[in-house]
Image (spheres, rainbow, N blue to C red):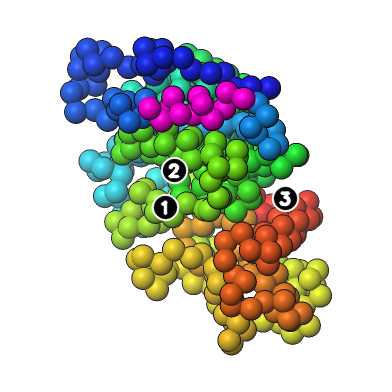
Amino acid sequence: MALVSLDGETSLLNMACVSKDHLDKNVGTNTRILISVKAINIIMHIKDIIKEAPAFSKGRPEVFLDMDGVVADFFSEYAKMANVENYRMIPGELAAPILDKMQGTDFFYRLPKFPTADALVNILTKTFGHYNICSSPLRGDHENSDKMKRAWIKENLKTQPKRIVITPNKAQDAPAVQADGTPNILIDDRNTNITQWEQAGGLGIKYQADEDGLDTVIEGLKRAFEVIRGQREYSAQNIISKDRGGDTIAQQEINESTLSDHEDELRDFVKWTCDKLKIKKMPRLEFQDSKESGDQKKTAHFDMQDGMIWIYTGNRNLADIMRSVAHELTHYKQDEKGQVTPDQSYPGSPIEQQADAVAGYLMKLYMDKDPGVLE
């Protein structure tokens, strides 16, 4: 089935629901909602990429749109609750108490809609024919979060999504990859969500509505379609989350954690994984809540020289940490069998593909055994 095609520059501008007069009147002359000529050209290029169904080696990708920070302005309301001008000014020690206050309330239902929300939805519906919402619930408040988010979506989005998925594990429940191997696309403002999605085999677009222009989404779609069609080699994006990680930013967010929160769970998971992989000698693992430097991009690493596995646990949810553990323990087992050499450990290499596949399989088995991992 071919995706919906786009014809002509005029229809592209109408599609985005953007006019300069409207923007000047409603959201100011300095807004970043304006779609540039470059972005229009990219959309036209996407049309060329997708106009022939046989161009896809597998099936048709689904697109999933996050809610908070993407179409709903979570950050301004979060800042109001903390009585600060900007959410980045919220001290880390106040994060948990503020998030606790949201539980059982209509917080998500009251969120303002970003001025770009309708334009973004229209871009997706014109490109895919429809779109889906995939959003995370507040930790410990799943049922109420689900109810309030669905109510917000019904009231605020003119074009309703085909599916609404409210889950703390987007990659598994959306899912990131279809049964035939087709990668789905996630547009999300959180680095951890994009990372987990791409580790599961999906394609992510990092976008935060109050800081990024719609060009970011359009360029991301171009990249995704080229990867799916085989015109571009897949590689995980080198992105840094703009809303997490600074010293003045709340470190414990909606569904994320640090090592101290889950030491027992991680200890049990390491033992269980070693048993499943039939690892002969238990490796030395180092869990760390902080990175060695601000520009360090890796979240986990297996050092062949001393047989040590390093796992970054700061500002990551438990399932994401466990996936890294499973991935690196698979490398450890590969090393036990003499399968690992330094020149083999590059993105997309056979040993990396095997580690990804085994980690995904182990995570599925473990979460079937212990669904509480997702809490």
Q: Secondary structure at mark 2?
A: strand
Q: Amino acid at mark 2?
A: Lys
Relative side of 290 to 20, left or right: right
x and y percentages locating residue 29 in the rendered image: 18, 23
CA–CA distance in space, label 2 to label 1: 8 Å
Q: Residue at x 45, y 38 (%)?
A: 220
Q: Secondary structure at mark 3?
A: helix
x and y percentages locating residue 67 in the rendered image: 48, 32
CA–CA distance in space, label 3 to label 2: 28 Å
Labels 1 and 3: the sequence-earlier one: 1
The range drawn in magenta is: 41-52
Query: Above or below — where is 67 with respect to 273?
Result: above
The residue at which mark 3 appears reads as 371
Residue 334 image-quadrant placement: bottom right
Magenta highlight on residue 356? no
Q: Do the CB atoms of the residues marked 2 and 1 lie less than 8 Å apart? A: yes
Q: Amino acid at mark 1?
A: Ile
Residue 206 shows which numbered tag? 2
Relative side of 16 to 6, left or right: left
Q: Nearer the viewer, residue 72 or 98?
A: 72
Q: Is residue 354 visible?
A: yes
The residue at which mark 1 appears reads as 239
